[in-house]
Image: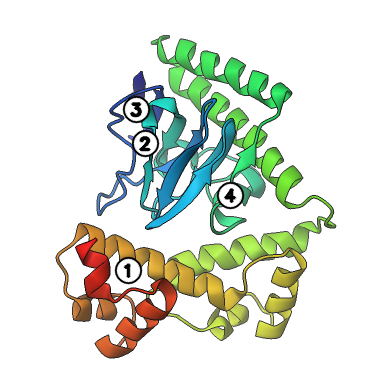
Amino acid sequence: MQLEHLCPKTKGKLIFTHLEKRPAYFNKNGLDKDLLLTIALNGEQAQEIIINGITHQFPAYSIIPLVSAQDYNFEKPEQITAWQYSRDFYCNVDSYFEISCFGVLFFGYRGSQFLQLNEAGREKFSVLRQLFIEEFQTIDTIQTDMLQMLLKRLIILTTRLAKEQYLAGKIYEEEKFDLIRQFNILVDQDFKTQHKVSHYAQRLHKTPKTLTRIFSGFNYSTPSQIIQDRIIMEAKRLFTYTTLSVKEIAYELGFRDAGHFSRFFKKATNLKPSDFRKQ
C-alpha cells in the first residue's frame, strides 16, 4: 500500500507506505528538489538497513527518522511502514521547535537513531496508522488539515520516544539542547563553505570550547565531527547521483585542493573517492 497526498496550497507532499514490496519513494534522495523527511517503522522481524554505505541492524518494532540527505536501503522494505513528507507539507504548520522540521528528530541528533517501541507504543502506532489510512480515503476540503494534524501527532509521539530513550538519566536543559539543534541547522546550511567550528560558535555567540562541553554533556558527537559527517554525507550523495569528478566535488564542498579532499574522504570512510564510486 502506498498513498500520496499533495497540499493544494503549497504543493507539499505526504506519502504513506505500508508493507509495500516495491515502494516508489524509498531512497529517492538524489538531486531532486522534492527531498523528503522520513519516519520509518520496522515490523516484527529485525532486518538490515544501509545508511550512507554503512550497514546497521534495524531492530524489530523500532523506528528510525531519516533526513533527506541520507542515502538508505532496507533489506526487507515489505516490512516497513513509513511516513515521508516534504518541508512544504508540514513545516509551514506553526509548531514548537522540538517538533518542527528543524526539531529534535532530524536536527537534535546525528547518526543512526533507532527508537524501540514497547507493547503500549506498538498499539499507539497501530491506531495512528489506521487513522492515516482512513484519512487518505476521505477526500474533502479539510483533508490536508487533518493529515497535517495526524502527522504532527506522529512527530510528537516519536519525539517523546527520542527524548525518553536518548536523554534518559540526563538533565534536560532546554536552552542547551536547543543550542545543539541550532548548531545542526547552521551546519546543514553552511557546511559547503564553512568547515571550522569557530564559524558556528561565533554565529551562536559561544566559544568552541563551550560548544564542545555542552555537546559532551549530552553524550553527543563533537562539533567538528558533526561538520565532518555532514560533508561526507553530501560527498557520498554527489558520488552516487552525479558524474562530477573528484575535483569538481571537492570544489563544490569548499575544498580548493582535490588531494586534500581525497585524503579527508579516505580518512573518514577508509575508501578512496574512486573506490567508493565503484561500489
Question: How far apart in space, not on screen, are marks 1 and 2 (Cα)?
Answer: 27 Å
The earlier-in-sequence mark between 1 and 3 is 3
Question: How far apart in space, not on screen, are marks 1 and 4 (Cα)?
Answer: 21 Å
Q: Which numbered disc covers residue 12?
A: 2
Query: Which amino acid, by three-letter code, is at mark 1?
Result: Ala
Name the residue tied to disc 4. 113
Name the residue tied to disc 1. 235
Residue 224 at x, y percent in the picture: 56, 78
**Residue 43 seen in this snapshot:** yes
Query: Which amino acid, by three-letter code, is at mark 2?
Result: Gly
- Mark 2 is surrounded, within 10 Å at the Cα level, by few (under 14), some (14 to 19) or many (20 or more) other residues, namely some
Disc nearest the viewer among 3 and 4 = 4
Quarter of the view holding residue 246:
bottom left
Name the residue tied to disc 3. 8
User: Helix or strand or loop: what does disc 2 sit on?
Assistant: loop
The residue depicted at 40 percent of the width and 41 percent of the height is 86
Query: Which amino acid, by three-letter code, is at mark 3?
Result: Pro
User: Helix or strand or loop: what does disc 4 sit on?
Assistant: loop
Question: How far apart in space, not on screen, are marks 2 and 4 (Cα)?
Answer: 26 Å
Front residue of 36 and 243: 243
Colour pattern: rainbow
Residue 141 at x, y percent in the picture: 41, 15
Is 236 left or right of 38, judged from the image as shown?
left
The residue depicted at 59 percent of the width and 18 percent of the height is 126
Q: Are marks 1 and 4 in contact (CB under 8 Å)?
A: no
Q: Are marks 3 and 4 in contact (CB under 8 Å)?
A: no
Disc nearest the viewer among 1 and 3 = 1
The earlier-in-sequence mark between 1 and 2 is 2
Is 217 left or right of 4, judged from the image as shown?
right
